[in-house]
Amino acid sequence: MAPPFLAARGLSKSFGPNEVLKGIEFEVHAGRNVALCGENGAGKSTLIKLLTGLYSPTAGQVEFEGEKAGWSDPRQSLAAGIAVVHQEFSVLGALSIAENIYLGAEPRTRLGLIDRKALARNAQALLDDLGITLPPNDLVETLSVADKQMVEIAKALRAEAKVLILDEPTAVLSQNETRHLFRIINDLRERGMGLVYVSHRLDEIFEICTDITVIKDGVVTSKGPTEEYTHDSVIAAMVGRELGDLFPPKASDPLAGEQVLQVRDLVVAPGLPPASFSVHAGEILGLAGLVGSGRTELALALFGAAPATGDVTLDGEPMPFRDPVGCIDAGMLMLTESRKDDGLFMNSSVARNFAATTPGYGVHHSAIPPGHEERRAAVLKERRGVVVDHVGLPISALSGGNQQKVLVARLLENRPKLLILDEPTRGVDVGAKAEIYKTLRMLADEGMALLVISSELIEIVGLCDRVFVMRDGALAKELTGEEITEEAIITVAAAETSTHHGVAA
Amino acid sequence: MSTLVRATRAQPVHLVVLALIAIVFFVGITSSDRFATPLNIANVQDQMVALAIVALAQTIVILSGGIDLSFAGLLSFLAVVFAALAGDTAGTLLIAMAIVIALGIGIGAFNGAITAYIGVHPLITTLGTSTILAGCALLITRQPSGSVPLFFEDFTYGRLGILPYGMIAVIVLYLFVGFMLWRTTFGTRIYAIGDNEAAAAMSGLPVQRTKVAIYALSGLLCAVAAMYMTGRFGVGDPRAGVGFDLRSITPVIVGGTLLAGGKGGVLGTALAVILLALLANVLNFMNVSSFYQWIAEGLIIIAAVSFFAGRKGKS
Amino acid sequence: MTATATNTSVKPNRNTVRATQRRELLMLLGFLVVIWAVTTALSPRFLSPANLKDILIQAAPLGFVVIGQMIVIIVRGLDLSVASIMATVAVLSTSLIDVTPLIFAVGLLLGAMIGAVNGYLVAYRHVTPFLATLATMIVLQGIRFAYTGGAPGGSLPETFRFLATGSIFGIPVALIALTVTAFAMHWLLERTIFGRRLKLFGDSPEAAYMTGAPTKLLQVMAYVISGVMAALAGLFLVGYVGIVDNWTGRGYELDSIAAAVIGGAALSGGKGSVPGVLLAALILVSLFNIVVILGLSIELQLVIKGTLIILAAAVYMKQSQS
C-alpha cells in the first residue's frame, strides 16, 4: 500500500508545562476523507497547525508521502500540497476571483508580466471543472459567503493540493450550499485527493467521511473506517458520556409566566413580513432556522442594534429601537454570536471584561474605587467555574471555553428581565455546554425570559420549551412541547428555500 | 472596455472629479483672458509636477494599507544632499543622482523594514524618519545652499510644446506605476496586502518583503521629486519638503483611494492632482487669497471622505 | 499606590494588565532619571533650580496637549488639529476680549466646539480620524489667517501674562494648572465609568456598543477634551511667549503624538495613562533642553525626537509580542 499523503507519527506538542498533544498517530490516504472529531480544546486545531508547519512538534514528526516533512512555515506545506480552508477565509475582497485563485502563482508572459487573458481563462476552466458558475473577473467582495468558500477551494485545486483540510466548512452555509459543497468534496475525493474534515456535526461526518479519528484530551481515543461507528460510539469516544444528560428537564408549563416581551409587527428589513410573538417569564424560547434565515437580524433589532419598525414592549413598557444602551437600561441583555468580534475586550483584564456592562455596579458614590473590578470578579473563580490564575490577566490568555464562561457570568451579574443568547455554546466543549444549559434553565426557573438562537438542532430540541422556526426572514412556524423534534424543524426551515446565487443547485 | 475600467481601477467618483475639472476650467476661462494661454497652462503643470510625484508615491503606500509621512524630511534632506553633490558637470550630476536615488530607496526600505518586521505603525515610523531627516537637512545647511549644473536647471524649465519636461516625466511615471499595478505580481500583492494583510500572509505572499519594497519605491519616487525641485530652485533648500507629507495625502483621498487600503488607483490621484492645481491657479486669477484656498482644501477633503464613508458603512 | 490593598486577596502576578502598565511607567521613569543623571554629569548647570523650572514651564503646554491627544488615541483616534486649535484659539480669544477670565472662558469654549466638530465627523460621519482632523487643521488655518489678514496684533493683559509666567510660592502658575488638570484627567480616566468606557471602546468598539456604551458620545467627548486641552495649551503658550502668532503651537500635533506614543499609548487604541504621557512629555522637553545646555546644534533636537519615537514604538511592540 502506498504511504499516506500526510501522516502524524507519535506527534506531541507542549506549551510550557502543558502537554496539548500526546503521541498522535494520524494519516490521510489518497481518496479518503478523514473526519477529525473532538471537543473544543481536545487539540484538533493544534494538530492542524502542526500538520501545516505553523507549529513545530515537541516530539514525533509529520510525514508527507512517507518522508519526514520538516516544515517550519505554512508556506512550505502549501507549496508541498497541503491546503487549508479556514473558518476565516483567506480570500481577498479587493481582488477578482481569478486573481484570488492564482494569487502568488499568476500565469506570466515571457516578459514576466501577468498574463491577464490566461489568468481569466484558466480560472474559468477551474471553476467550470468544479461546477461553479461564477464570472472570474468579478471582485470577491461581491460574493456570498458560500461562494467565497468555493473560491478558496478552487484556490486549493489550483495549487494542485494533495491534501485539503476543511475546518468547520459548513458552519456558515445554508442547507443548499452545504449540499453543493458535499458534492464537490466527494468529487475531489474520487479524483484522488486526501481530505481532512473537521466538524462538530455528526450527521455530516457520517454522510461524507470515509474514516473517523477521534481526539480527546490530546490523545487519539479511537480511529477507523466510518462503517464501524455509530453516532453514539463517536460521542462516547469524544466525551465518554451519553448526550441525554446534557440537558436539564424542561419547564412544566412554559406559558404560565407573564408575558415579559411582547413584539407586534416587527419589521427588520423592508419587504419582510412583520413578526409578532411574545416571550414569557420562566420559558426558554428557541429561534431555529438556517443561517441567513434572519434569526440574528431579529435579535439585533430587538436589542436596538439594528434598525427596525414595529411595537416592542418589555414588561409593558414600550421599547425604543435606538441603540443597545436603552435596551440594557430597560432590562434586556444579549450574548452575541461572535465572541471575539463583539463580545470580548481582548486586551483588557478578565475582571474588566466581567464588569464591562455595568462598570459602576456596586459603587455607592461616583468614583470607582481601585480594585473594585477585581473584587467583583472574584465570583468568577468562586462560583462560575472560570479557570484563571489571576483575574487581572488579559482575557486573551484564557481558553475559548473559559472566555465564554466569563461572558455568561457577565450576563448573570445583571439579572435582566429578558436574555437573548445567540449561539450560546459556540466553540465551547461539551462539559462547559452542560454547565451553560444548566445555568440557563436555572435562570428560567427563577422567572427570567430567555430567547435562544442556535444552529445546533440538538441544542434547540433539548433546551427550548417553545420554538419558532424562521425561514427567509419570517417566523414560519411555532412548535411546542412534543412537536419540537429535529425533523420538524428541518422540514420547516429547509422548505422551498430559494436557490442561492452562484452555487449551481 | 470593462478591461480598461478594471485595469485603471476607474470609479464613478472619477466622473465627478472630471466634471469638477471642467467646471473649474470653464470658470478660469471666463474669469481671465490669460488663463487659457499656453504660458499659463504650462505654469499650472509646473506647479503640479512635484506634488504629482509624491502623491503617486503616497498612492502606492496607501493602497497597501500604510501611510508615508516621511516626505517632508525626506525631500528636504535629499534636496540638500543633491545640491551639495551635483557640482557643475554631467559627471558629478550623475554621481549625485545615483547617491540621492540610493538614499531614497534605502531610507524608504528602512521605513518598510521597521513597519514590516517590528510591527510599528507606519504613521509612527515615517513620522520618526521625517523628523530625523528634517534635522539632518538643517544640520547640513541652515540656508539654501549648493547648486546644480546649469543645463540641469534649464532642463527642469524646458518644455515640448505646452508639455514641460517635468510633466512628461510625471506622465511616464504614472503610466509606469499604473501598468505595474495591473500587470505585475508586485502590483497584485500591493492590493492584496492593503485589503487584508493576514489573509495575504495565509495565502503565502511574502508580506514583509513586499512592504519593504513598497516603501522603498516610495522613497525612490521622492528622490525623483527632490531632484526636480532642486533643479527648479537651482539650490538645495533644507525646508524644500515642508508640508509635502500632508499635502501628498489630499489628492490620493480625493481621487477615491481608501485610506484603509486595497481600493483605488493612480487614475484617481492623477485627476485629483489636476483638479487641485487648476483650482489653485483659478483662485489666484480671481484674487482669492491663499487663506481661503486652505479653507477650500479642508472642505474638499471632508466632502470627499464623507462621500466614501457613506459607501463603506459602519466604522 | 492604593492598588496594593486589593492584592491582599489575590496573589500578585506579573502578567496582569496592571502589572504590565506599572512596568512601562517604571521604564519611562528610569529613562528620565538616566538622561538627567548623564546630563548633570556633563553639565552641572542642568540641575540648577532655574533650569529645572524652565524645563517644567516649557513642558506645560505640551503636557496639556498630550493628555488630550492620548485620550483621542485611546478611542482609536488621532488629532492632527491640536496645533491649529492652539493658534486659532489664541488668535481669536485674545483679539475678541482683553479680560483674562473671559479670554480663558471664550478660548476653552472655542476649543470644545472645534473638538465637537472633529468628534462629529469621526463618530457620526465615519470620517477617518486622520483625515477629519487634517481637514479641520487646514480649515482653521485658513480661517485664522483670513481673520487676521495674515498678521495678528494686539497686546495681552498683564494678568494673562502672569498666569503663564508668574509663580505662586515659587511654583509656576502654568505648572499648578497642569498638575490640577492632570489629576482631574487621571481621575476621569481611571476612576469613573466614563473613563472606563473610553478604554473599553478603544479595546473593542463593537463589544463596547453591545455592552451598552454610548459609543458616539464617547468619541465626541474624547475630541472635545482634546480641543479643550489644546485651547488651554495655546493660551498658556502665548502667555509665556508674550506674542500672539498665527503659527503658535506649530509642530505640537506631531510632538504630542510622539509624546503619547513614547508614553505608552498605542494607535490601535484602548491603552494610555496620564502619568505615562506626562513623563514622556518631560523626557522630550528635557532632551530639547539638554541639546541647548550642552551647546549642541539645535537641529539635533529633531534627530533625537525622531529616533526616540521609533525606538519607543519598537520597544512597546516587542514587549507586547513577547
Image (spheres, coloured by chain):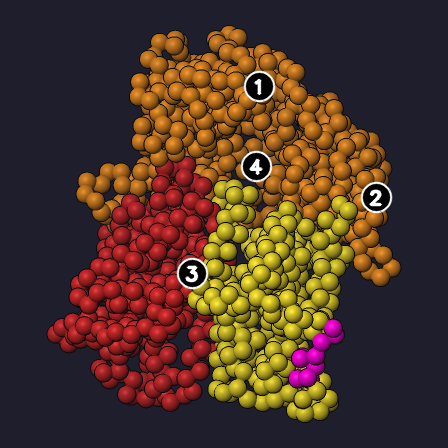
Which marked residue is nearer to the observer: mark 1 or mark 3? 3
Residue sitting at x 74%, y 24% = A505
List the residue tagged with mark 4. A42
Q: Secondary structure at mark 1?
A: strand
Which marked residue is nearer to the observer: mark 4 or mark 3? 3
Which chain hosts label 4? A
Q: Which residues are magenta?
A: B152-161
Image quadrant in which you'd find residue B75? bottom right
**Pointer 2: residues within 10 angstroms few (<14), some, or many (20+)?**
few
**Residue C49 is one of the magenta-drawn residues:** no
Which chain hosts label 1? A
Q: Which mark is residue A121?
A: 2
Q: What's under tag 2, amino acid-wise? A: Arg
Q: What's under tag 3, amino acid-wise? A: Val
Residue A394 x/y as whole percent: 42, 48
Residue sitting at x 53%, y 47% = B307
Residue C78 x/y as whole percent: 43, 58
Q: CA distance from mark 2 to mark 4?
A: 44 Å
Q: CA distance from mark 2 to mark 3?
A: 51 Å
Q: Earlier in the sequence, mark 1 or mark 2?
A: 2
Contact, mark 4 vs mark 1 (Cβ under 8 Å): no
Residue A3 x/y as whole percent: 81, 42
Which chain hosts label 3? C
Q: Colour of chain A?
A: orange
| Left or right, residue B165 beside residue A215 | right
List the residue tagged with mark 1. A471
**Pointer 1: residues within 10 angstroms few (<14), some, or many (20+)?**
many
Q: Which mark is residue C139?
A: 3
